[in-house]
Image (cartoon, rainbow, N blue to C red):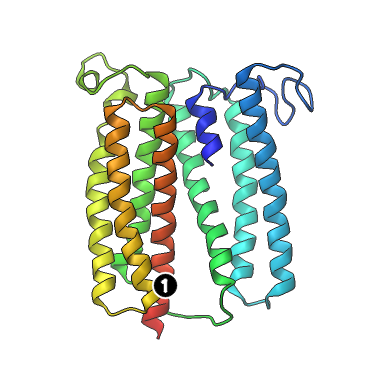
Amino acid sequence: MLWGAYVRASDSGAGCGGHWPLCNGEVVPRATSAQTIVEFTHRVTSGATLLATIALAAWSFFLFPRSHRARRAAVLSVVFVIVEALLGAGLVKLGYVEHNASAGRVAYLCLHLVNTQLLLAALALTAWFSRRSSEPSGRPSRIVFATLPIAILISVTGVIVALGDTLFPTAGMQQDFSAGAHFLLRLRILHPALAILGACYFVFASIAVLRSNPRPLTARIASVAMVLAFAQLGAGAINLALLAPIPMQIVHLFLADLVWLALVLLAVESAASENR
């Protein structure tokens, strides 16, 4: 996931030309340009992820009974990773790379991001559910469950900002309000505004979980979620102040993924606490 972000941030999406799954018409490209190496490496690691996820699902069928949640999560992981590969191919085939600043690319990247988040959640839950054989039937409270669509919405606006930072790397905040500014720049204000509001809600939901006297594990996850929410805000502020250098973009995305995972596990464990 992080390498995929580097492909976009380094403008390497067209490193293999318009070919997929081949790279510049070759299985192993002979071109040694930096963009080709970055894009080809991403394709190799994506292929390895696909094979590993299929192996994970097969192993889950060997380890767990038919009704076990780890099995279902592993199957969903395979579905999402296949969709992820197809979406990645679509980016190349549709020309949504390099300097393409169309609304179609924005919509496509948002769809790609949502699927990536679902894939990450399914993989994490496969591992998490493998820890126990019991099947808690409780449901997370609405307060906790609402953190998930909010987190996805914030991530979607983050994709818009990241694309704008890639296409207009020297554009400062003052240009966002210019009459002639590109629509990607005008939309950039949405992300920090929603991120601040979202972080406040994540903290509120975590405190609500802590006040309900949950199990120690659930309390730890809620505490971690709060810490990560504040860390993510700090990273976002630094990223904005520095005009989004690539290393900071990667750190920002990594923290966003950790926040997402913490919220997913908080929803699952808070449901287990309610059930008990």
Outermost right residue: 27
Quadrant holding the C terminus: bottom left
Tell me residue 125's x, y (percent): 53, 64
Kindly indicate the quadrant of the structure image that contains residue 172: top left
Q: Quadrant of the N terminus?
A: top right
Look at label 1 and name its amino acid: Glu
Q: Which residue is mark 1?
A: 269
| Residue sitting at the far top | 180
**Residue 263 seen in the figure:** yes
The 10 Å Cα crowd at callout 1, few under 14, some 14 to 19, many 20 or more, is many
Quarter assignment of residue 33: top right
Q: Residue at x 40, y 31 (%)?
A: 162
Q: Position of residue 79 (x, y in %)?
A: 63, 53
Is disc 1 placed on a helix, strand or loop?
helix
- 166 or 96: nearer the eye? 166
Q: Is residue 164 left or right of residue 79?
A: left
Q: Is residue 140 visible?
A: no
